[in-house]
């Protein structure tokens, strides 16, 4: 939530500070706020756009998702709970 406020270009610093203080339920000194703003500026791989998520969902729906399951080996080991008949028809 704080990052959303920091990345909101429509807000002035005074408004950003007020919003962040509301989110954190505490007053923030100006020096600490400046530090948080600088940290927010260093984060460059995050956006508030929801386009990327919707495009990925559309690709998944159109093309599907490849899922590979590991072989559990249960197919080879399943004999211990089976009942076998011998040649005389006796159960063993």
Image (spheres, rainbow, N blue to C red):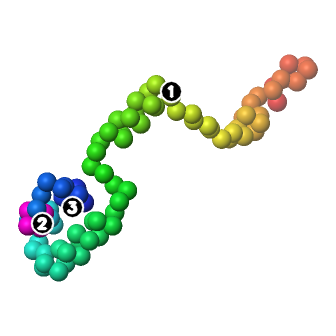
Q: Using a 10 Å C-alpha cutoff, classify the residue at mark 1 as few (fewer than 14 neighbours), some (14 to 19) or many (20 or more).
A: few
Residue placed most toward the observer, 53 or 41 = 41
Q: Using a 10 Å C-alpha cutoff, classify the residue at mark 3 as few (fewer than 14 neighbours), some (14 to 19) or many (20 or more).
A: many
Q: Is residue 1 visible?
A: no
The residue that disc 1 covers is 63
Vertical relation: 90 (above or below) 38: above
The residue that disc 2 covers is 13
- Write the start and end of the magenta stretch as one range: 13-17
Vertical relation: 90 (above or below) 37: above
Please tell me which of labels 2 and 3 falls first in the chain: 3
Q: Main secondary structure of the magenta part?
A: helix
The image's mark for residue 77 is none
Q: Using a 10 Å C-alpha cutoff, classify the residue at mark 2 as few (fewer than 14 neighbours), some (14 to 19) or many (20 or more).
A: some
User: Disc 2 versus disc 1: distance between alpha carbons?
Assistant: 44 Å
User: Is mark 2 in CB contact (under 8 Å) with mark 1?
Assistant: no
User: Is mark 1 in CB contact (under 8 Å) with mark 3?
Assistant: no
Q: Horizontal placement of 85 versus 22: left or right?
A: right
User: Disc 1 versus disc 3: distance between alpha carbons?
Assistant: 36 Å
Vertical relation: 66 (above or below) 2: above
Residue placed most toward the observer, 80 or 2 = 2
The residue that disc 3 covers is 6
Please report the residue visible at 82 percent of the width from the left and 30 percent of the height from the top. Answer: 92
Q: Report helix, strand or loop for mark 1.
A: helix
Based on the picture, tell me whether residue 15 belongs to the magenta stretch. Answer: yes
Q: Report helix, strand or loop for mark 2.
A: helix
Based on the picture, tell me whether residue 52 belongs to the magenta stretch. Answer: no
Please report the residue visible at 90 percent of the width from the left and 19 percent of the height from the top. Answer: 88
Q: Quadrant of residue 85?
A: top right
């Amino acid at each position: 939530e704080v990052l959303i406020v920091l990345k909101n270009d429509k807000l002035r610093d005074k408004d950003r500070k007020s919003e962040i203080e509301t989110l954190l339920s505490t007053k923030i000194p100006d020096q600490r706020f400046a530090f948080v703003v600088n940290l927010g500026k260093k984060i460059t791989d995050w956006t508030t756009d929801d386009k990327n998520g919707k495009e990925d969902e559309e690709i998944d729906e159109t093309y599907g998702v490849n899922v590979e399951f590991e072989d559990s080996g249960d197919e080879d080991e399943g004999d211990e709970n089976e009942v076998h008949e011998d040649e005389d028809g006796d159960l063993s």
